[in-house]
């Protein structure tokens, strides 16, 4: 695909040589991890295609859209309300944060002990390899953890269009009021960017588009409750990852198609793994493309992942936005209420998350929980200790893994994960 | 029925041949550059001691870091399960196994049948592992096997405060230059190892009986230190070399799997 898009990438200011190297690594990783799986749904072919064109056709679509006035907004977090973006006929895309790149440049700007996700965002910018970031008319940085908050101060000097959204840290009335005020401010910013006035009808349409996308992934999640599980955790994770990039309507259709296929499969007991394969619930930090390391280790060590308690997963997508209000203000309230339920570890205290882990464990029939903490992600690493203690107290086998995007610890992790799975049998 | 377990770790490789649930022969060797080479060599050596060849094996389970690269193994199991299983076979009273290998250490809790139920593992660095001891012995200019007995000659062990192998090695060199007693330094090293491992053991919980496996279990200084810090006896493996326990566990799993296949 290189030649086809070279001009486009070049115009976006990408470093073609570095970008080629990145695509090669990405392509090889995808081949090794994804294409080696057996018994995949035929509908995953669409996602293979999306991944093969992730920096190609999709970016071209965005750029074609921009020529017609469709603005592109980039985001790093599920707290950026997509409903508002869609209401203005703009596009929301998740920015690249799932791989180490240009680390020597990054570490000139950020401390070494910054989490991989934040470093990755900087690496893609400094290495000039993220076409999404370069296509974005507006980049939204959100004040979640301290790492991101402070890193945005530095990112602001690297990009011309950073918009910082403040976020509450407590689930209090004051916290909700802050979120409401910030979403109102964001709505105005989107209106200013797009020149579109967001009225009730537009907001309802935005909500509908995003809700449909959520409903499709809910449907997929439901299917994973079956034993044998009809889809691998890797494939389900990929669907959740592509959620952030793809055209929402096409994405919704594609996920529903897979669900149709899997429903048929479930009827014939044709799983992605044999019956009675140990079932794992992943919980913790989000996994952005191409961060497939831990799921790949788990699923090549004799277990199947049946759910992700993660922002790239059920934490991020589980609630719908109520579209029944008649006024713009009522709909904005509904959007605030929906997002205020997200139980990210930046909230203190955050009991809902632990409850959700236990709910998911039961709902998906998981035999054990693997807690994934990104090294130096203080909120999730701090929470992982009480979460593990509570789960163990409830008799739920739990393995706590702290790792990063590097591949140096794969063998050690494999030993640990295999041993954990051996205790579940 | 003849089965085998093969454990290829970071520093050494071991093979154990079981015949009808008892150890027929075993072999230990320093690792070769490639795990498959180590596995092949150590297994052939062990087999030849009993005039056997690979073709005589009904089943072979591999374990250790090289477990997936061993061509003649029928399946693989993590060394954590294997050490638990092997130690329990050697002494059925064992419920807690402290395994200190070349590049990591693990504490394993097993049930009354020898199956692992919980574990903790240090795999972040070489501190508290065989590699650490090896480096220290080198700095002291003594052999690894002398490290244990040496430390009993000391009356005042020197405190080793660094957990990092590289930095601790530097400290040891400085101590020697300062004219400190080699025995006191060795005792300090063993004590530091024991203290580090005891922290991890306490995390899993000390349930009696406690056994030690892996190469470091051959260091009487560390074993003695652990007994003291944990205030618990470390039981005997009834003559089984602690270094072959991983391979032994793998052989026991091989026996179980071979029997299961026969029943099919």
Image: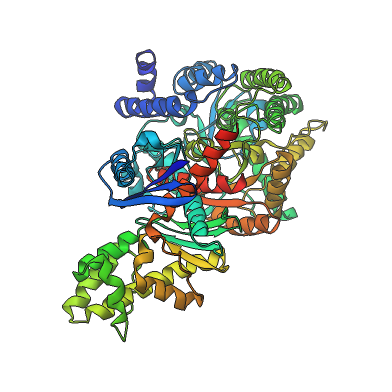
Q: Position of residue B102 (x, y in %)?
A: 34, 56
Number of numbered discs overlaid on the protein picture: 0
**Residue drawn at (45%, 64%), measured in percent from left and top?**
B237
Residue A51 vs residue B184, the one in the foreground: B184
**Residue drawn at (66%, 44%), measured in percent from left and top?**
A367
Task: Indicate the quadrant where residue A332 lies.
Answer: top right
The quadrant the C terminus of chain A occupies is: top right
**Residue drawn at (74%, 40%), measured in percent from left and top?**
A363
Question: Which residue of the protein is positioned furthest toward the front in this rendering?
Answer: B51
Q: In this view, does A38 lie above or below A299?
A: above
Q: Where is residue B261 in the image (x, y as percent from the top left)?
A: 55, 34
Residue A59 placement, left or right of B221:
right
Residue A45 vs residue A41, the one in the foreground: A41
Q: Can residue A114 be seen in this view?
A: no
Q: Position of residue B4 (x, y in %)?
A: 42, 43
**Residue drawn at (56%, 34%), measured in percent from left and top?**
B262
Q: Is residue A318 visible?
A: yes
The quadrant the N terminus of chain A occupies is: top left
Residue A245 placement, left or right of A204:
left
């Amino acid at each position: 695909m290189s030649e086809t898009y070279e001009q486009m990438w070049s115009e976006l200011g990408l470093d073609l040589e570095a970008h080629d190297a990145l695509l090669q690594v990405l392509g090889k990783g995808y081949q090794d991890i994804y294409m080696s799986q057996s018994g995949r749904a035929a509908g995953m072919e669409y996602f293979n295609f999306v991944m093969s064109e992730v920096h190609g056709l999709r970016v071209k679509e965005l750029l074609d859209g921009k020529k017609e006035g469709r603005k592109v907004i980039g985001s790093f977090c599920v707290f950026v309300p997509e409903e508002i973006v869609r209401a203005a006929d703009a596009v929301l895309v998740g920015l690249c944060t799932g791989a180490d790149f240009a680390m020597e440049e990054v570490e000139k700007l950020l401390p070494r002990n910054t989490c991989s996700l934040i470093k990755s965002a900087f690496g893609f910018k400094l290495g000039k390899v993220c076409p999404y970031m370069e296509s974005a008319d507006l980049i939204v940085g959100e004040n979640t953890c301290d790492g991101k908050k402070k890193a945005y101060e530095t990112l602001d000097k690297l990009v011309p269009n950073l918009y910082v959204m403040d976020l509450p840290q407590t689930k209090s009335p004051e916290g909700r009021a802050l979120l409401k005020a910030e979403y109102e401010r964001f709505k105005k910013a989107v209106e200013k960017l797009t020149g579109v006035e967001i009225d009730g009808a537009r907001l309802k349409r935005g909500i509908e588009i995003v809700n449909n996308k959520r409903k499709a992934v809910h449907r997929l999640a439901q299917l994973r409750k079956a034993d044998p599980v009809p889809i691998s955790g890797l494939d389900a994770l990929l669907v959740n990852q592509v959620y952030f990039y793809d055209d929402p309507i096409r994405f919704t259709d594609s996920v529903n198609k897979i669900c149709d296929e899997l429903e048929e499969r479930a009827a014939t007991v044709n799983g992605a793994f044999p019956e009675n394969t140990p079932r794992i619930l992943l919980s913790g930090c989000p996994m952005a493309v191409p961060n497939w390391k831990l799921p790949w280790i788990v699923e090549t060590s004799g277990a199947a992942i049946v759910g992700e308690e993660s922002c790239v997963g059920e934490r991020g997508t589980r609630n719908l936005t109520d579209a029944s209000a008649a006024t713009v203000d009522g709909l904005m309230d509904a959007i605030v209420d929906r997002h205020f339920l997200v139980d990210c570890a930046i909230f203190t205290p955050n009991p809902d998350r632990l409850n959700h882990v236990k709910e998911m464990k039961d709902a998906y029939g998981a035999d054990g929980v693997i807690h994934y903490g990104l090294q130096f992600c203080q909120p999730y690493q701090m929470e992982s200790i009480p979460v593990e203690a509570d789960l163990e107290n409830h008799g739920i086998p739990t393995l706590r893994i702290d790792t990063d995007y590097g591949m140096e610890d794969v063998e050690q992790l494999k030993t640990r994960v295999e041993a954990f799975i051996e205790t579940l049998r | 029925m003849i089965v085998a377990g093969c454990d290829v770790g970071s520093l050494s490789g071991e093979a154990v041949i079981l015949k009808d649930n008892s150890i027929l022969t075993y072999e230990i060797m320093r690792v070769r550059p490639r795990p498959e080479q180590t596995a092949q060599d150590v297994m052939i050596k062990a087999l030849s001691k009993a005039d056997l060849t690979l073709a005589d094996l009904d089943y072979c389970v591999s374990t250790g870091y090289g477990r997936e690269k061993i061509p003649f193994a029928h399946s693989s199991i993590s060394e954590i399960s294997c050490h638990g299983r092997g130690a329990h076979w050697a002494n059925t009273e064992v419920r807690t196994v402290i395994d200190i290998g070349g590049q990591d250490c693990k504490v394993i809790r097993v049930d009354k049948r020898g199956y692992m139920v919980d574990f903790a593992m240090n795999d972040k660095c070489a501190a508290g592992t065989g590699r650490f001891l090896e480096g220290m012995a080198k700095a002291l200019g003594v052999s690894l096997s002398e490290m244990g007995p040496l430390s009993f000659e000391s009356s005042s062990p020197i405190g080793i405060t660094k957990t990092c192998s590289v930095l601790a090695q530097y400290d040891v060199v400085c101590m020697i230059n300062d004219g400190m007693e080699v025995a006191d330094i060795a005792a300090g090293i063993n004590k530091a190892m024991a203290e580090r491992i005891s922290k991890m053991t306490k995390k899993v919980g000390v349930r009696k009986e406690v056994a030690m496996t892996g190469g470091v279990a051959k260091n009487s200084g560390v074993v003695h230190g652990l007994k003291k810090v944990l205030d618990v006896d470390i039981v005997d493996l009834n003559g089984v070399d602690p270094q072959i326990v991983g391979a032994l566990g793998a052989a026991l799993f091989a026996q179980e799997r071979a029997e299961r296949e026969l029943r099919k």
